[in-house]
Amino acid sequence: MEKFEINGGKKLSGKIEVSGAKNAVLPIMAASILTKGKSIIHNVPGLEDVFTMIKILKYLGAGVKFENKTLEIDPSGINKFVAPYEFVKTMRASISLLGPLIAKFKRAEFSLPGGCVIGSRPIDLHIKGLQKLGADIKINDGYIIANANDGLKGNYIFLGGNFGSSVLATCNVMCAAVLAEGETAIEFAASEPEVVDLADYLSGMGAKIYGTGSSFLRIEGVKKLDGIEWTIIPDRIETGTFVLAGAITGGEIVIEKCQPYHLGAFWEKISASGITYDVGKDYIRVNGRPSWKALDVVTLPYPGFPTDLQAQMMAFLSLADGVSIVTEKIFPERFIHVLELNRLGTNIIRDGATAIIRGVKNLHGAKVMASDLRASAALVIAGLAAEGKTEISRIYHLRRGYEDFEKKLKNIGVEIKTLEE
Ligand code: UD1
C-alpha cells in the first residue's frame, strides 16, 4: 500500500491544472450505453473510479479504449445486464448504470450498494423514480432485480428526499426518461454542474430535455439516441481543493483549466475568510494571506457549499482566527476526518452533524490515516501547513478522485513523496 510523506510549512507558488470532473464522467460513461453508436469522450481523468467503470462496461460487453485522456466506448456488444457486488462495493457510482440499463435493455440486476464511511447511502429515490416510469423493481438476495418488459412511460416524479435532491438519482431517472414513451417531469431535480453536463451530453445524443440546470426538468422521450463526441467539464471539487491548498500555505497559485463559476457558495466563504482571488474564464489566482477569519459553513445541494469540500474546508479553518462552525446537511455522519486532523494539532470537536473548530496557531506533522477520498485531501491540506513531516497512509482513497496528485502538487512547490508502506 502506498503512503504520502509531506514536508510541510512552505508557501506554495506556481501553476496547477485541473482535470476532468470525476462526478461528470462516471454518469456520462454509464449513459453512453443508451445508444448502439460509439461515444468519444475527451478530458477524462485517469482515476481509479474511471478504471472501475471501464471494467464494468467491459464486463457488460462494451468495447472500451482509453488513451490520452480520451475514452472511446462502443456499447453495441453489450450482452450482460448484471452489476455484481465486486464492482458495486468498490464504487457506489456504479449505480448510475441502473437507469441506462433499464431504459436500453429493459432489465438490470444490481448488487445493493451498502453504506460507506461517510454514512448511510440509501437508493430509495433511484428506485422510486424508475418505478414511476414503469419499471418493475424487486429486491432479492441483496440484488435489485429490475424489469421493464412493457417499456417505460413518462410520468410526473417528485424526486426530493429528506436531504434534498439526489445527484445520481436525478442522473438515473433522466437517463431512463429520455427513452421512455411520452413526457416526464422531474420535480426537485439536482442541479449540480455534473448533472448539467450529463443532460447536455444526452441532448447532444438527441434527447429532448428542458429546464437543464434547474430543479424542474421536462423530458420528451425519443425513440433512439446517437453516439457523439463530448468533452467533460473541469472538476470543481479538485479546483476547490487546490484553492484551499494555496490559501492554507499563504501562497500565491494559479489554478488553470478550471470553471470558476461551478463553485457556488464556496466563493462566498472564501471571500468571507478574507482570502482574495482573481477569476478569469478558465483560471483562478489565489492570493494567500498570513491569517484568515473563522467561518460558519453549512453544506447543501448545489449551488450551496459542496459536501465534497467540507473536510478540506475544515482543514483550512483549523488555522483561522476564531471559532468556526461546520454543519453537514447532506451526509450527517461525514466527520471521520476530524480525529485524524486533530492528530496534526487541529482543535475540532464534533457534536452530531456539526463540528466546532477552534482556530490554532500552528499544526505539526504526524502519522495519519486516510479514511475516504475527500478526507484524504483534507489531511494533505493540513499536512501542507504543518511544520515537519506528515505521513498519510492508505492514499488509495485519494487515487479514486485526484489525478496525478503528487505531480501536480510538486509543480507548485510541495515537498511530497510517495512511499510503500
Ligand atoms: C453524489 C456524488 C458525491 C457527492 C454527493 C452529494 C457522484 C458520483 N457522487 O453522490 O461525490 O458527495 O452527490 O453532492 O456524483 N439520498 C436518499 N435517497 C436516495 C439517494 C440519496 O435519501 O435514493 C440522500 C443521501 O443519503 C444524501 C443526499 O440524498 O443525504 C444526497 O445524496 P446524493 O446526491 O444522492 O449523492 P450521490 O448521488 O450518491
Image: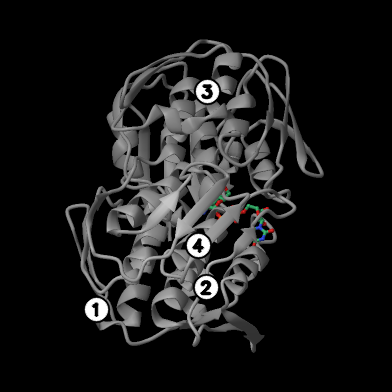
Mark 1 closeness class: few <14, some 14–19, many ≥20 residues within 10 Å: some
Q: Earlier in the sequence, mark 1 or mark 3?
A: 1
For disc 3, the marked residue is 267
Q: Earlier in the sequence, mark 3 or mark 2?
A: 2
For disc 2, the marked residue is 153
Image side of residue 73 versus residue 201, left or right: left
Mark 1–mark 4 distance (CA, rounded to whole Å):
27 Å
Residue 242 image offset from top left, x and y in percent: 42, 31
Q: In this view, does 401 lie above or below 172?
A: above
Question: Which kind of residue does numbered mark 4 sit on?
Answer: Glu
Closer mark to the observer between disc 3 and disc 4 = 4
Mark 1–mark 2 distance (CA, rounded to whole Å):
24 Å
Closer mark to the observer between disc 1 and disc 2 = 2
Q: Could you say which is closer to the camera, residue 95 or residue 114?
A: 95
For disc 4, the marked residue is 183
Q: Which of marks 3 and 4 is nearer the N terminus?
A: 4
Q: Which of marks 1 and 4 is nearer the N terminus?
A: 1
Q: In the rendered image, is residue 399 in sight?
A: no
Quadrant in which the N terminus is drawn: bottom left
Q: In this view, does 186 lie above or below 273?
A: below
Q: Residue at x 56, y 79 (%)?
A: 135
Secondary element under disc 3, as helix, strand or loop, is: helix
Question: Which kind of residue does numbered mark 3 sit on?
Answer: Trp
Q: Is residue 334 above or below residue 79?
A: above
Q: Residue at x 29, y 53 (%)?
A: 204
Residue 212 image offset from top left, x and y in percent: 46, 45
Image side of residue 241 versus residue 310, left or right: left
For disc 1, the marked residue is 76
Instruction: Give the color scheme: rainbow, by chain, secondary structure or one colour.
Output: one colour
